[in-house]
Image (cartoon, rainbow, N blue to C red):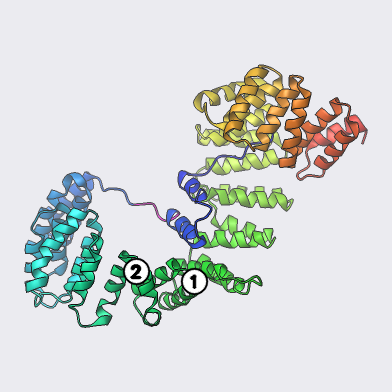
Amino acid sequence: MALAEVEVLTTSEQEQLSAPADEPKFDRLIRTELQGGEPAGETPSPPLAEDWLERATRSRDPAAWRRAAELLCADPENRKRSVYAAEQALKLDRDDIDNWTAVLTAHACTDSGKLGEHLRAMGRRFPGLSLDEVLVPLWPHLQEKRQIQALLKSLGPIVRSSRSLWREADIPYAMLLGRIGRAEEGLKWLRRVDDPETTERARLSLLHYLNRHQEIIEEFDTCRHSSDPASLYLCKSSAIQMGRLDMALTLTRKMIQLDPFSPSLHLELASLLISLADPEDRNIEEAEHALAVAADLGSTAAQLFLASLAEGRGDKRTAVEHYFRVGTPERFSHSLSRGIQLLQELRALPEALERINAMIQARQKPNATLLVMRGELYARMHDFAQAEEAFAEALRTDPVHLGASMGYSYALLENGDERGALRLTRQLLDQHPDNPNVLNMRGYTLAVLGTDLAVARKLIEDALIQRPANAAFMDSLGWVEYQDGNLERALELLETSWVLEKNSEFGLHLGQLLWRLNRREDAERVWRQAAELYPVNPKIEDILDEHLGR
């Protein structure tokens, strides 16, 4: 059995890797970028809000009251108290618009029913202020239809009879209508505004709500001359919806002119260029340049895309560099694993070990995932004494790390500590009774020792139910049948395993079976093929010397 691939992916990474196969390139990349972004903020705990309340009471600082109101608003159990905190800030300074906005936000998040009253008072205090700007802080708190309906009810009288208090009141009113499925009504409200440029973004948004993408792209000339990023985004999105990638490409280039430091825009430019590439790949060079810019701006997805393109053209060395730039034990550890695999294909496992060791040494604290990778590299190079030490160190760092436990049990078995391997695989099976790698590891350990073969067979068959095309599992089951004397069944399994994956351990087992079946020439052929694999398996060399006097 070959050492099973170490399970070191985080849940979020597994979700990224399980993206639907038919998901468009750009959507999949942006999905990766967003999921790999900064962790979502946690709901502030009440003690933090209490600290700010205490600080505000002592200092009589409006900013402290506003901060307390913000934290209370984010805590579902304390939202009603946010109005009190915000009103304290307003009492201290009625000329600061931030204090008025804090009260407005508090009323929005508590559904106090006083939103309209406060809006009217705010309009009288700051005549000529844009309602659109004032409502911006409210948007995160308007997630439910009833909240938007309450705000619309408050805004109705303002929009209809108090237009002198607010500029552009019709625009946010129309947008709110769109958010609750009344986009057609919102478009009618926009007709009250005489300036088309002012209503451009809102009108496009409402058409977007209505899925009237054809109408949007019919205004392509207006879109491409726009300087509003949101309007450009809406036009580009509609162009993609209608399959007009050429239009989307033009609009994306315009968006990059307005915001040249957005990695996601360069990433989308690359995706569109690749989607539009002809058989001669005339757009690929520009796409790679866009990806390089996005990567320099910090885009992980761009690095992964560059690695994929490099692999596609057979440039494994460049792909390795991209994978190692992206990968860390905490995020995108699968990139490190892929980089290591490519280095094995390049016959450069010592370099992979050097890279992993450098990452280990650069950290102040031991990292179990990196130590597991070190152990796996030693195992691949058939240095099981060093592998055992690395896996043991990983377990000292993280006693419940499954990859470390799996690797350690395999190293124990290879180093002749059969009791230790049996004990550890028994523990792993108790803890992870449905994990296919654990089922296989326990079954293979029993097979190597030639004991409880019926149990071993059942365990590995259960693993194969979950992963029916797994070459390592087939090799393990083949070895069970070999040990149990079922040589024809063993031959079927071991030959299939060898066809699926050219692994020296699989070749060793198949050759031993062929030799036992008196097919000496076939056994020699398989062993010699296995001897050419990298890294060289000393057990293959030993068996060639033993049987063929090489």
Report the front residue among 453 and 180: 180
Q: Residue at x 33, y 51 (%)?
A: 41
Left or right, residue 117 beside residue 277: left
Name the image quarter holding the N terminus. top right
Judge the density around disc 2: few (<14), some (14-19), many (≥20) Cα neighbours within 10 Å: few
Tell me, for residue 245, which label it has, or none: 1
Report the front residue among 203 and 436: 203
Name the image quarter holding the C terminus. top right
Judge whether residue 534 can be spotted in this image: yes
Q: Residue at x 66, y 28 (%)?
A: 412
Left or right, residue 24 beside residue 224: right
Image position, residue 364 (x, y; %)? 50, 47
Measure the C-alpha gap from mark 2 to mark 1: 17 Å
Image position, residue 490 (x, y; %)? 75, 27
Q: Which residue is mark 2?
A: 212
Report the front residue among 174 and 273: 174
In this rendering, the answer to whether 399 lies above or below 279 is above
In this rendering, the answer to whether 7 lies above or below 361 is above
Judge the density around disc 1: few (<14), some (14-19), many (≥20) Cα neighbours within 10 Å: some
Residue type, label 2: Arg
Judge whether residue 92 can be spotted in this image: no
Q: Nearer the viewer, mark 2 or mark 1?
A: 2
Disc 2 secondary structure class? loop
Magenta region, residue range: 36-40
Q: Is residue 37 magenta?
A: yes
Image position, residue 535 (x, y; %)? 75, 44
